[in-house]
Image (cartoon, helix red, strand yellow):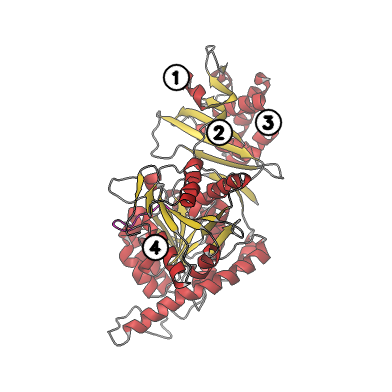
């Protein structure tokens, strides 16, 4: 069924189809609408779930961990300072191998206080052990909601899943979305079953301590779990395409990169404008391409190195800065290239912080800057710095 | 791409109109794509608000606010100012709800139609005027959008508003 929906509403539709049994959430702009919609669905009976209003984000995720430990499929959603407030629990959820799904509406972090979109909130939590996906549009958001549980709950993965939607630009923008029907969704996503749960018939110790002799083994397994998601994502997307007819391309999405000399690597909703700009430049003979990172964890090391290998230069465009160094996506991309022995000049472009618009002209300027060589780290509209280059 | 900027005051339903137009345009099958979004940020009743609708025959990649519009639709004439023309494409038009003639804009007394139908606001009247003047979506599609996205009990009056306004615009 086709509907004209916002990113938040589309994600809520995907979650309704995924049938979580427990939803615990605390509202925060620009996530509010997704939890409002879900509470309406619980109220009208179209989603049979326990909806728990909690007093904080820390409790929202704690509640979801408790539900998951009881064997329930659990969902929560947050944004910005809310994500940071629940940071302690992020590590508990990942370490406990609880396949909770969370939607994060990417929003700037204080101070200065600001409710608009950038990606500093979720990118600051890359090390928490969660799978991290970034949607570009409302359809992908809905489809991610449905696929996320399949990936998180896979026994080789057993890892919580964070689906990121750019605040406002994606969460509050309306577009046409195809909502799968219930039978198809049920066929795609069976109910959650796990041994990693409290069971009075078969008691076991959960969420325990582990000293220096065994702790690192748990951490190694946690790492292997996130890595295992890589193959599970591919398999899940193939099955998804078979049932719903929509294809996704794994950890990255390439656009006109086969013969590209200049490539922008980016993530989230700005990718569309990058592709349009690449098209325009190609009409003038510039061989421009785009790589959209769909998953930051597990990180697409091989994919990125494979695509950038034959480029003359690349830019990483991100709505993030790790103060005193560079954007975190840039750090990750550079590491992928170093490991693969690829030596192509790369430059970092920081934009969109606090919701500032990134225009088509800004993107054109990035392509021309990397063709001519520029500073290592560049703040769009302000300037750049060598920073160790 | 056809781009529309909606101007209204918080509570007048400018964004609802922007959304209805997007839903109307895409209700036909085929290659029709739309984005609709409000000016982002805190909401306040009575404060000036902007909303945007972008219509195209391919997916709309540019999610930023419209800088050059085909139409600017103004729900409250106190928000009209001549400088708005700088936001228009060369052959663009401004449609404004006003009891007075406004130079450089197409003005209609939308409140009159709204009052007749006992509607508290003019948003669907303005949507009807826009479809009548521009043909960016048909009245039938606009009616479908009302049926799909407005609460049942206010559908009938809003449908009448669209049809009546579209007729008046021609």
Of residue A239 and residue A356, the one placed in the foreground of this image is A356
Q: Is residue A37 shown to the viewer in this render?
A: no
Q: Secondary structure at mark 4?
A: helix
Label 3 vs label 1: CA separation? 28 Å
Number of numbered tags placed on the structure image: 4
Q: CA distance from mark 3 to mark 4?
A: 53 Å
Q: Nearer the viewer, residue A187 or A247?
A: A247
- Compared with B26, A196 (above or below) is below
- Report the magenta residues as a range: A318-325
Viewer-nearest of discs 3 and 4: 4
Residue at the disc numbered 2: B17
The residue tagged 3 is B139
Disc 1 and disc 4 on one polypeptide chain: no
Using residue A8 as the reference point, say whether residue A92 is left or right of it: left
Mark 2–mark 1 Cα distance, whole angstroms, equals 19 Å
Which of the two labelled residues, at mark 2 and mark 1, occupies the earlier sequence position? 2
- Residue carrying label 4: A331
- Main SS, magenta region, reads loop
Outermost residue toward the front? A372
User: Dot 4 falls on which chain?
Assistant: A
Residue denoted by label 1: B78
Residue A206 against residue B23 in the figure, above or below: below
Disc 2 secondary structure class = helix
* Residue B70, horizontal then vertical, whole percent: 59, 29
Q: Nearer the viewer, mark 2 or mark 4?
A: 4
In this view of the protein, can residue A363 be seen by the observer?
yes
Q: Is residue A321 magenta?
A: yes
Mark 3 and mark 1, same subunit? yes
């Amino acid at each position: 069924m086709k509907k004209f929906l916002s990113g938040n509403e589309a994600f809520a539709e995907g979650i309704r189809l995924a049938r979580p049994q427990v939803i615990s959430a605390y509202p925060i702009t620009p996530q509010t609408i997704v939890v409002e919609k879900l509470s309406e669905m619980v109220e009208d009976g179209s989603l049979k779930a326990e909806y728990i209003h909690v007093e904080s984000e820390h409790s929202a995720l704690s509640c979801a961990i408790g539900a998951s430990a009881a064997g329930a499929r659990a969902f929560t959603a947050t944004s910005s300072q809310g994500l940071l407030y629940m940071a302690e629990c992020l590590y508990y959820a990942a370490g406990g191998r609880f396949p909770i799904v969370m939607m994060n509406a990417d929003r700037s972090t204080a101070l200065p206080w600001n409710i608009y979109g950038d990606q500093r909130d979720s990118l600051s939590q890359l090390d928490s052990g969660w799978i991290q996906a970034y949607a570009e549009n409302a359809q992908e958001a809905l489809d991610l909601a449905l696929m996320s549980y399949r990936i998180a709950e896979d026994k080789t993965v057993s890892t919580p899943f964070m689906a990121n939607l750019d605040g406002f630009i994606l969460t509050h923008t309306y577009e046409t979305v195809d909502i799968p029907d219930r039978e198809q969704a049920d066929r795609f996503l069976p109910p959650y079953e796990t041994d990693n749960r409290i069971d009075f018939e078969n008691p076991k110790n959960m969420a325990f301590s582990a000293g220096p002799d065994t702790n690192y083994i748990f951490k190694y397994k946690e790492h292997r779990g996130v890595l295992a998601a890589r193959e599970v994502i591919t398999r899940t997307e193939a099955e998804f395409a078979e049932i719903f007819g929509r294809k996704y391309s794994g950890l990255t999405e390439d656009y006109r990169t086969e013969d590209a000399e200049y490539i922008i690597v980016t993530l989230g909703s700005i990718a569309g404008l990058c592709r349009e700009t690449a098209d325009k430049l190609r009409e003038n003979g510039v061989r421009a391409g785009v790589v959209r990172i769909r998953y930051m964890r597990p990180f697409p090391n091989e994919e990125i190195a494979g695509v950038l290998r034959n480029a003359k230069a690349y830019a990483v465009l991100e709505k993030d800065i790790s103060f005193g160094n560079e954007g975190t996506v840039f750090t990750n991309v550079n590491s992928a290239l170093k490991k693969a022995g690829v030596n192509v000049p790369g430059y970092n472009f920081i934009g969109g912080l606090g919701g500032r618009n990134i225009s088509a002209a800004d993107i054109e300027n990035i392509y021309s800057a990397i063709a001519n060589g520029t500073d290592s780290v560049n703040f769009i509209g302000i300037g750049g710095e060598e920073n160790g280059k | 791409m056809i781009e529309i900027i909606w101007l209204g005051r918080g509570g007048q339903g400018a964004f609802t109109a922007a959304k209805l137009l997007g839903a109307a345009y895409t209700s036909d099958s085929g290659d029709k794509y739309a984005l609709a979004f409000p000016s982002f940020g805190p909401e306040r009743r009575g404060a000036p608000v902007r909303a945007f609708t972008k219509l195209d025959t391919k997916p709309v990649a540019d999610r930023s606010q419209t800088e050059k519009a085909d139409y600017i639709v103004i729900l409250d004439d106190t928000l009209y100012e001549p400088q708005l023309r700088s936001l228009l494409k060369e052959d663009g038009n401004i449609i404004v709800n006003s009891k007075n003639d406004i130079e450089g804009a197409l003005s209609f007394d939308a409140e009159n139609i709204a009052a007749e139908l006992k509607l508290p606001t003019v948003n669907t009247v303005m949507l009807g005027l826009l479809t009548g003047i521009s043909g960016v979506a048909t009245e039938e599609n606009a009616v479908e959008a009302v049926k799909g996205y407005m609460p049942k009990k206010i559908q009938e009056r809003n449908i009448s508003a669209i049809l009546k306004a579209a007729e008046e615009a021609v």
